Amino acid sequence: NYGVDFSGGRTYQVRFDQPVNTTDITESLSAAFVVEDGPAVRPEVKTFGGSNQVRITTKYRVDDKGIEVDEDIQNKLWAGVQGYFADPVERDAFFNDDDNKAYGLMSSSQVGPTIADDIRTSAIWSILFSLVVIFLYILIRFRKWQFSLGAVVAVFHDVLLVLSLFSLLYGFVPFSLEIDQAFIAALLTVIGYSLNDTVVVFDRIREYLTIHPKRNFDENVTSALNSTLSRTVNTSLTTLFVLLVIFFFGGETIRGFMFALSVGVIVGTYSSVCIATPVMVDTLSRKFKGQE
């Protein structure tokens, strides 16, 4: 479910005659912007300037064009916001083009598909570039491509799982799970978190291999994993606790972002131990392990 950043959409700047709550307006517009035979199209509502002015961004009927479409969107917009004026405002007064009006629709704009496509391409390249840099960084640090492969596979697993949950749960949870620029930022954060945990585990494995060169390779790896397990769990739990607090009390606009980070922390924790390390161990040569 692509957000406005990727699919394009329309933006409206609306000024009220009293302070308004963006969460209430979001819920009201979500009930209005409903595609026939489809889920509600949840808009993005942010305070813009004063507390009585908001910017509403929606992708409702983004692929449709024509006068009838514009009228339909305006009707849905009016139905969603008219109840938040202290004094009743006529529909014509809300939509008129008078530059001196105090309240109503102050401006509107549309995000075209060309801009949206450019943003989508940049997001994909940013993810791929980060994976390449991770591979090279681990290769330089540990001198073995098997370590790089394990780290990249673990990170790819983390990104794929977060993306899959966003796709599967869309429409079933009471908050937005759109793929937008905030989601891309969450993915890159998850990549960094998972990589940090993987490097700690790999460093401990290298340390045990150096300290106990005559011990069996598998025993060294097992001991290294056991020694980092408590640190990994404690770090992840404290991070997850903070993310959950923000998720429940931080507001509607960042709930999807916090959900992505929370899932990323969970999967990034076990992927370092259960994916990155096994991939590294399985691809290392028997000669390096001292088994030949």
Image (tube, grey):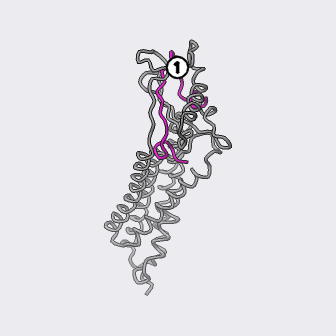
Q: Residue furthest right?
A: 37
Give the residues drawn in magenta, as a range: 1-28
Q: Is residue 96 magenta?
A: no
Relative to 129, does residue 46 appear above or below in the rendering?
A: above
Q: Is residue 24 above or below residue 146?
A: above
On the image, which quarter does residue 100 sit in? top left
Name the secondary structure under disc 1.
helix
Q: Where does residue 83 sit, x and y in percent of width and height?
A: 60, 20
Q: Residue at x 56, y 45 (%)?
A: 177
In the rendered structure, the answer to whether residue 197 lies left or right of residue 60 reads left
The x and y percentages for residue 190 are 46, 52
Q: In the shown orientation, is residue 42 left or right of residue 231?
A: right
Residue reaching furthest to the front: 67
Indicate the position of residue 71 as horizontal and vertical percent values: 57, 30
Seen as rendered, the residue at the extreme left is 140
Three-letter residue code for mark 1: Phe
Q: Is residue 139 above or below residue 18?
A: below
In the picture as drawn, the residue positioned furthest to the top comes out as: 87
**118, 141: nearer the viewer:** 118
Location of residue 107 (image quadrant): top left
- Residue 10 within the segment the image draws in magenta: yes
The image quarter in which residue 146 lies? bottom left
**Quadrant of image for the C terminus:** bottom left
- Foreground residue, 137 or 16? 16
Residue 33, x across and y down, in percent: 60, 35
Q: Nearer the viewer, residue 121 or 63?
A: 63
Answer few, some or many: residues within 10 Å of disc 1's Cα (few below 14, many 20 plus, some between 14 and 19). many
- For the image shown, how many numbered marks are present on the structure? 1
**Residue at 37% in and 61% down:** 134
Q: Which residue is mark 1?
A: 94
* Along the viewing direction, whichever of 63 and 252 lies nearer the viewer: 63
